[in-house]
Amino acid sequence: MRSRDALFAVLYQFRLLILMLFLAPGLAQAVPSPVLPIPAAPDIGARSYLLMDYVSGQIIASRAPNERMEPASLTKLMSDYVVFNELKKGRLKLDEYVTVSTHAWRTGGSRMFIEPNKPVKVVDLIQGMNVVSGNDATVALAERIAGSESAFADLMNAYARMLGMRNTHFTNPTGLPDPNHYTTAYDLSLLARAIIRDFPQYYRWYSQKSFTYNNITQPNRNLLLDWDPTVDGMKTGFTDKAQYCLVATAKRTDMRLISVVLGTDSPKARAQQAQSLLNYGFRFYESRKLYSANQPVTKVKVWKGSSDEVKIGAAHDYYVLVPRGRGQISASVQLNPQVIAPVKKHQQLGTIIVRNGDKVLARIPAVAMHGVSEGGLIARTIDTVRLRFQ
């Protein structure tokens, strides 16, 4: 009797095992994993802030991004943009010597400790301006390029307009207080993005942790360079009115973020707030490549041309920022109703509309991948008649 009960028990367990093997996959598919919502951005202790994806330019989080504020030494990022342009155009050389004026030597605030009437290499002045935020070095460079601080500020404002910094005005190259000297978190993000994009060959100075000149070694005030190995720039600032400010950028794998933090109460706080923003962005968002430059997406008929059609695509690489692991990306192409030759290469013939669900993420110009010249007389005449009936 006991042996028969034992046999029944074994058979019962065997049947359970068979049921689990066949039914478990179906049960697993019937209960999908929950999709957790992305939390709100951290509520950091800053008067104004912004977090931007470098490649796409999309904003992840912000507070008062267009409020005009005193930028303090973040001003020197625009001074950099002017200096780097002069280097790129060959009007300034890294190994060139600049004789320091008494005016530059007397400039207050942070100093590189250059001396009046003594020549200093441009490369040293650039490091003095960026690594130790030397106002004396900044004025020396401004005078070399434009003759005076006010003339240099005119160049700064011209470049600001070119970059789309609509709520920015500079009166000096250093960031020393002036009621007509202001910018915004958003404008500073545009400037930081432009520096990284336009001058990668000079970007290395933003990650330099110290600089020694005249036997005086000073540290870079960007604490994130020591805290986070993925942070490789950019600039700190402080005045009594602006308080402690920081533009910081980090790259993790193939994604770069730019954070702007304005108006915190200590050097440590500005670094902590920027770190919180960067960590949030990298944790919950990802950058996806949508199109490669000059890769055909579709084609469209060409009337009166030497060819009946032209291939359509994007003129540049395009990326989009989406919530990590949950971006439902779709794209549609709206083309011009009639395309008539001649067609030039990269001529816009429509728009690629990119969506994440119902939200429009980007509108990308759909351009011709190649040119199409006019067709012969007979081909043009036939197409003219066909177009009338169409």
Image (spheres, rainbow, N blue to C red):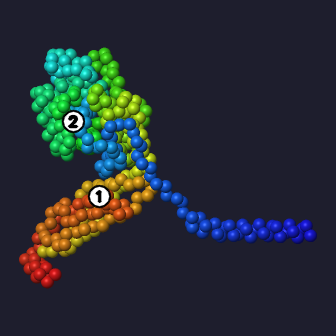
Along the polypeptide, which appears first: circle 2 or circle 1? 2
Front of the two marks 2 and 1: 2
Q: Residues within 10 Å of mark 1 (few under 14, many from 20)?
A: some
Camera-nearest residue between 44 and 374: 44
Label 1 amino acid? Ala
- The residue lying at 26 percent from left, 30 percent from top is 72
- Amino acid type, label 2: Tyr
Q: Quadrant of residue 327?
A: bottom left
Q: Is residue 337 visible?
A: yes
Q: Is residue 113 above or below residue 320?
A: above
Image location (x, y in percent) of residue 192? 27, 40
Vertical comparison of 161 with 95: above or below: below
Mark 2, residue position: 182
Quarter containing the N terminus: bottom right
Horizontally, residue 122 falls left or right of residue 290, namely: left
Residue 92 spot, x, y in % from top left:
16, 31
Secondary structure under the numbered disc 1 in the rendered image:
strand
Q: Is residue 376 above or below residue 31?
A: below
Residue extending furthest toward the left: 377
Q: Is residue 349 above or below residue 304?
A: above
Callout 2 secondary element: loop
Q: Which residue is mark 1?
A: 362
Is 259 on the left or on the right of 152, as rendered?
right
Image coords of residue 363 (percent x, y): 26, 60
The residue at the point 43 percent across, 58 percent down is 326
Image coordinates of residue 228 in percent, x first then y, are: 42, 35
What is the CA distance from the residue labelled 2 to the residue labelled 1? 30 Å
